[in-house]
Image (cartoon, rainbow, N blue to C red):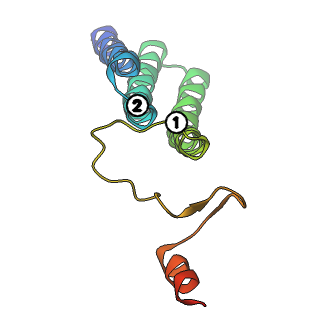
């Protein structure tokens, strides 16, 4: 019974990893690609690790699988944020149907400083 459950988790994780890889090809810009790969990739890797834990049922394997799950859950969103932010600041174009760009006008390209809306208002009020 545990083999069937482990196979289910591995197949479900593989499906989500497939969805993540399709998101790289189907999404129109860097930010939506990063969103697709981060969400589905972490879920897929976590489900595969759950299947590995169920299949082997060894404390060493379980601890390593939990470590992999924790590492991907903590680092993948941070890495995606850093890559997306770097792409935005170097000028990677957004999708033409992007509705809202909250960073537009806040980034000073000369000093590489991102200002809050209150700071921009203070700078505009000064003579």
Query: Is 49 placed left or right of 74 in the picture?
Result: left
Task: Give above or below for 127 relative to 14.
Answer: below
Residue contact between numbered discs 1 and 2, judged by CB atoms under 8 Å? yes
Q: Which residue: 27% across, 39% down?
A: 97
Query: Is 112 placed left or right of 59 in the picture?
Result: right
* Residue designated by label 2: 29
Q: Which residue: 49% across, 62% down?
A: 105
Q: Nearer the viewer, mark 1 or mark 2?
A: 1
Q: Give the quadrant of residue 15.
A: top left
Q: Give the quadrant of residue 68.
A: top right
Q: Which residue: 65% across, 55% down?
A: 109
Q: Position of residue 10 (x, y in %)?
A: 36, 14
Q: Quadrant of the C terminus?
A: bottom right
Q: Position of residue 117 (x, y in %)?
A: 47, 75
Question: Of 24 and 16, which appears nearest the observer?
Answer: 24
Tally the numbered discs: 2
Q: Position of residue 126 (x, y in %)?
A: 59, 90
Which element type, helix, strand or loop, lies under badge 2? loop
Question: Of 120 and 6, which appears nearest the observer?
Answer: 120
Q: Quadrant of the N terminus?
A: top left
* Residue designated by label 1: 92
Question: Could you classify mark 1 by the number of other residues whose Cα lies within 10 Å: few (under 14), some (14-19), or many (20 or more)?
Answer: some
Q: Residue furthest front?
A: 127
């Amino acid at each position: 019974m545990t083999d069937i459950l482990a196979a289910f988790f591995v197949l479900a994780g593989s499906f989500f990893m497939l969805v993540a890889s399709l998101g790289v090809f189907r999404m129109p810009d860097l930010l939506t690609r990063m969103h697709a790969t981060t969400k589905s990739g972490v879920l897929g890797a976590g489900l595969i690790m759950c299947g590995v834990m169920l299949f082997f049922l060894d404390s060493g394997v379980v601890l390593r699988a939990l470590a992999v799950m924790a590492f991907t859950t903590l680092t993948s969103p941070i890495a995606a944020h850093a890559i997306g932010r770097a792409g935005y600041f170097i000028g990677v174009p957004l999708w033409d149907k992007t509705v809202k760009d909250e960073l537009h006008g806040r980034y000073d390209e000369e000093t590489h400083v991102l200002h809050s809306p209150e700071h921009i208002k203070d700078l505009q009020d000064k003579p």
